[in-house]
Amino acid sequence: WRALMFTSLVAAVAAVASGLLPALRASDVRPEEAFRGRSQGAGVRRRPVGLIAQVVMSLVLLFVAGSFLRGLDQLQHTAPGFEVVGRLYAHTALPAASGDRDRRQQFYDQAVERLRAVPGVDRVALTSVLPLIPSGSECVSPTAAISLTTTASEVSDGYFATLGIPVMAGREFTAASLASQQESVIINESLARLAWPNDSAVGKPVELGCGPRRRAVVVGVARDTAVRRIGERARPHLYLQIMRQSGGSFTTIVLATSGEPSSLTRSVNDTLASMGQGLKVYEVLPLSVSVEQSYAAPRWLTRVLTACGVLALVLASVGLFGITAHRVSKRTQEIGVRMALGARRRDVFRQVLGEGLGELVSLGLTGVAASVLEGAAGTAGLSTHLAVAAIWLAVAACACYLPAAWASGVDPVVALRHD
């Protein structure tokens, strides 16, 4: 009800403001001029402020919407840093064993072995969270002078090979690392450059934990990938070995397949369901589905801006039609005189249509200038400018066509008697 009241109030204020200026102009007419007919043509050539605002706003909104469309298209063609094609994931939970690290490890080791035996599955690995899904964080102290909080995720051995993430230096985790007293971590290139800009990070000790700290050693450096969203600037990220800590009950299984991943969802789901022990399988989907879901926010914003741009375009075209039709009605006698003196219908049609389109061009230049000031046109690109110009010219031609056709069809005799 608050939103309804607010929008109703805004609509009422807009209606009053829109009718206020014409009412003030009408109340300022002098009686002697009105009787002489002087006020009838007054202001015919005056540039309408409301139409200027509509055209400028529609152009700015169309430029912004075009920029977002271009950005969304570029985003969808940006490599996330990991392989998406031929990848499958399964969100699972094991509540009964969530507090027992050894039981969880044993259970998921068996699950990995069974999934590897499924025809069409090449590799299987575990992670605490998929890329592009909000991950946890961890405090890291690579050196005594550097202490920072980075995004972090827990992964198993074979994770980087499964998702096609190159390990630029060192090695991946191994199953033997879990039995070792020394904890191992893998960092990405951004964290390695930040902590050891002129030295190799492999073999370097680090301290982990925001409270009580524990020591670990860097065993590998992985290539930077998108962590929270595609297209973001590379940020430091830390990979911990899954099942090393007690952790939670949720575990995501990632699989590399040799065929279409969607064709294996049923087999993977049935294999996991047959494991028993209260395992819950929430969804088994291609990784491309999760990546597409990460575009939901920019896609929604792009649609809203596009809808606003189209609505502003419609309002401005209606305004252009109204102004052109009004001017034609005020020039009925003039048009009649011209036609009586030999002007052809197509000449009148071209003149009215040309004046309407000329009005649009002059207003359009104002809109482009405004969009540049707002920074919209600078990011839109040449193709967006051309597309917006073509759309506006087509809409303006349609808006001016009817008044031009009406003007060209005026009967000179009737027009000369028009008052």
Image (tube, rainbow, N blue to C red):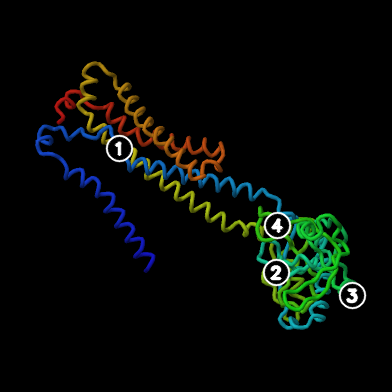
Distance of mark 1 from mark 3, alpha carbons?
A: 81 Å
Callout 1: SS: helix
Q: Gap between marks 3 and 4, in whole Å?
A: 30 Å
Q: Are marks 3 and 4 in contact (CB under 8 Å)?
A: no
**Residue 191 placed where, x, y %?**
77, 60
Q: Is residue 228 left or right of residue 259?
A: left
Relative to 179, is 5 above or below?
Answer: above
Which amino acid, by three-letter code, is at mark 3?
Ser
Foreground of the two, 285 or 54: 54
Query: Which label's residue is closer to the chain start, 1 or 3?
Result: 3
Residue at mark 3: 180
Residue kind at label 4, given as amino acid type = Ala
Q: Which mark is on residue 323?
A: 1
Task: Tell us which disc is closer to us: 4 or 2.
Answer: 2
The quadrant holding residue 213 is bottom right
Q: Check disc 1 and give the amino acid type.
A: Ile
Residue 22 visible in the shown view: yes
> Mark 2 and mark 4 in contact (Cβ < 8 Å)?
no
Q: Which of marks 2 and 3 is nearer the N terminus?
A: 2
Badge 4 crowding class, 10 Å Cα cut-off, few under 14, some 14 to 19, many 20 or more, is some
Contact, mark 1 vs mark 3 (Cβ under 8 Å): no
Q: In which quarter of the image is the N terminus?
A: bottom left
Distance from Cα at disc 2 to Cα at disc 1: 60 Å
Cβ atoms under marks 2 and 3 closer than 8 Å: no
Residue pointed to by mark 2 = 137
Residue 318: x %, y % from top left: 34, 42
Q: Nearer the viewer, residue 254 or 205?
A: 205
The reply to whether residue 125 is visible in this rendering is: no
